[in-house]
Image: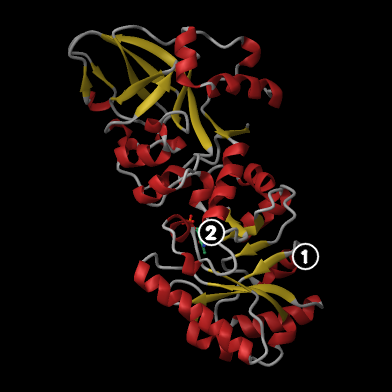
Amino acid sequence: MSISRRSFVAGSAIALLGGKARAAAGPETPPAARRRAGLDPWLEVEAAALEHNARTVARLAGGRPVFAVTKNNAYGCGISIVGPVLDRLDTIRGFGVVRAEEARQLRGAGVKKPVLLMGPFADDEVDELVRADVRLAPGSASDAPRLTALARRIGRPIAVHLYVDSGMHRMGMPHEQVLQWLDEPGLRNAIRIEGAFTELTEDQEFDRQQVARLSGVAGAARAKGLSLGLLHAASSDAVARPTPESFLDAIRPGLALYGGYVTPEAMARAELRPAYRLKARVIRVDRLGAGEGVSYHRRYTARQAEWTATLAIGHVDGYPTGAVRGCEVLVRGRLCPVVGTVSASHTVVALGAEASAQVGDEATLVGPDRPELHPNVVAQRSGWSEYNMFMHLNPGLARQLI
Ligand SMILES: *Cc1c(COP(=O)(O)O)cnc(C)c1O
C-alpha cells in the first residue's frame, strides 16, 4: 500500500510537536488519514536537519565547500533520499563515496554535482563511471598505466582526485611517491587533476604532520608547474574539534551531516540535529503480574504488577541489542525503559502501572525529539559506537522523507 507524502507529512507533524504537546492533549490515536499504513518499523529522514547540519559544518570550517560523504546508504539514512536533498544546497560542492555502486545510486537519484569515488575501480567499469561523470581516486602505482590506457580507449581525459597516503597506511599513494607517479609517460594527458586528498588518523598531533605532507606534495607539484587542484582532508572529527589547519580547500564530513558526534566534546560545541527517527508500532500491550518475566531468559522480572508494550522492531533493524542497558523509547509522549532482551524483531518497553499505550501507537526509538533518544546517547547507553547507530540501520526499512 502506498501512502501519499502529504498524508505522511501531516502525521509526522503531530509527532514533531514533541512529547509535551501530545501529553498535554492526552493520549490520542492519530486519525486514520494521518496514520502511516501498516505495522512495520520505518525511518523518517528530515530534510531540514540535513540542511541545518550541512550549513553548520560549513560554518565550522570557515565556509569551505563540502564534499558530502554518502557511503553505506548515506550513513543508513537512504542514499537516494539524502542525495537530492544535499545536491541542491550551495554549501555542498560534491559527494564522496567508497563503492562504485554508491556512485551509481547517486546518479540514479538525479544527483548532478560531482561524485568522487574514494575507493577501488575496476577496468570493466571505468567507461561507465566516466560517462556518469564520476571522479576516480587513483591511489596505487599501477593506476598510472591503467588510467593512461583507459583514457586512450575512452578518448578523453579522466577526472581524478589523487588519493594520497600521508600516514594512515590503509589506502592511497605513499606521499613520497606521488611526484614520481605523476611523471609516468602519458599520464598527465590521460588525467585531469581536480583535487588531491588524504585521510587523517584522527590523532591530533599526527594529523598536523599529515596535512603538512599533503600540502608539501601539492607545493612540490606546483613548483614543477602542476596543480593538484582542491586539497581536502578533514572529516567530521577535524571539523567538530575543530582543527582549522586541516580544512585546506574543502572538507569531507560524513557522520556530522547526519547529526552524529564523533566525541562528547564535539557534541557540546556544535548544534547538529539527528537527521533520522527510528520508529515502530506497538503491536501488543500486556500486563505483567508480580514476579513474571519478559522475553528470553526472563532477564527482567516485575517487582509488582505493571504493563508492557511490545514494539515491532528489533536488532535486525539497527536498534542495538544493548539497549536494555538503560535506553528509553518515546511512546505517547512518555519515555519508557527497554526491558527484557532486544531480539531480532521485537523490543519490549515498560509502561508502568497503567496500560498507557494501545496497539497501533507510534514509538520513537532514536531521533531528535528528546536528548535520551539522540543517537549518541543511545549509543553510549547501549555500549555501541555512534557510527553503528547509523551504519547498521537496516537497508530494508521503509524510509520517508519529511
Ligand atoms: C567515511 C569517510 C569520510 C567521512 O568520515 P566521518 O568520520 O563520517 O566524517 C571521509 N573520507 C573518507 C575517505 C571516508 O571513507
Residue 52: numbered disc: none
- Residue type indicated by callout 1: Arg
Q: Do tag 2 and tag 1 residues touch (Cβ < 8 Å)?
A: no
Identify the mark nearer the N-term, 2 or 1: 2
Mark 2 or 1: the one toward you: 2
Residue 230 is situated, as x and y percent measured from the top left of the image, at 63, 72
Query: In the picture provided, is 201 more to the left or to the right than 188?
Result: left
Quadrant of the snapshot with the N terminus: top right
- Residue type indicated by callout 2: Ala
Nearer to me, 333 or 240: 240
Please tell me in which quadrant of the rendered image residue 268 appears.
top left
> Callout 2: helix, strand or loop?
loop
Residue matched to label 2: 61
Nearer to me, 178 or 215: 215
Residue matched to label 1: 131
Q: How far apart are the alpha carbons under marks 2 and 1?
A: 32 Å
